Image (cartoon, grey):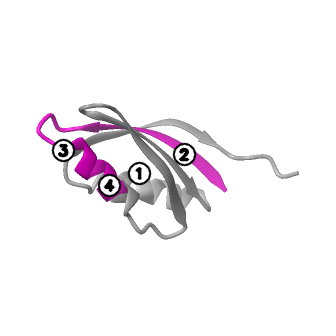
Amino acid sequence: MLNLYLFIELLGAANPTAVLNEIKALDVESCDIRNVVQLADDKLVAHVDCENGAAATRVVVEDITGVEGVVQTNIIAVVEPTKD
């Protein structure tokens, strides 16, 4: 399991609420979109949990980047929780 924390930049003309809702509604194989919040008119932060690195790469490079209005997706952190 990998926890991804993403900083998402939007086009200035994009509707941040619409983009946020579209990202939350993504059906991503092997990943769960846990939360997406708006920081400013053109910035979002997302928390995504993925089963493995391949799924994490796919969600960042293909799925979120493919949402209309998204200009750039930056990875803030990738955390692999410890197994107790």
Check disc 1: other Cα within 10 Å, few if <14, some if 14-19, many if 20+.
Answer: some
| Residue ID for mark 4 | 21
Distance of label 4 from label 3 (alpha carbons): 10 Å
| Residue ID for mark 3 | 15
Labels 4 and 1: the sequence-earlier one: 4
Labels 4 and 3: the sequence-earlier one: 3
- At label 1, the amino acid type is Val
Horizontal side, residue 80 vs residue 39: left or right = right
What number is the disc on residue 60?
1
Distance of label 1 from label 3 (alpha carbons): 20 Å
Q: Are marks 2 and 3 in contact (CB under 8 Å)?
A: no
Horizontal side, residue 49 vs residue 28: left or right = right
Q: Nearer the viewer, mark 1 or mark 3?
A: 3
Residue 73, horizontal then vertical, whole percent:
35, 41
The answer to whether residue 82 shows anywhere in this view is yes
Distance of label 4 from label 1 (alpha carbons): 16 Å
Q: Which type of secondary structure does the marked residue at label 4 adopt?
A: helix
Q: Residue at x 26, y 55 (%)?
A: 67
Q: Nearer the viewer, mark 2 or mark 3?
A: 3
- At label 2, the amino acid type is Leu
Labels 2 and 4: the sequence-earlier one: 2
**44, above or below 56, in the image:** above
Q: Which stretch appears magenta?
A: 1-23
Labels 2 and 3: the sequence-earlier one: 2
Q: Which type of secondary structure does the marked residue at label 3 adopt?
A: loop
Numbered label tally: 4
- At label 3, the amino acid type is Asn
| Residue ID for mark 2 | 4
Distance of label 2 from label 3 (alpha carbons): 24 Å
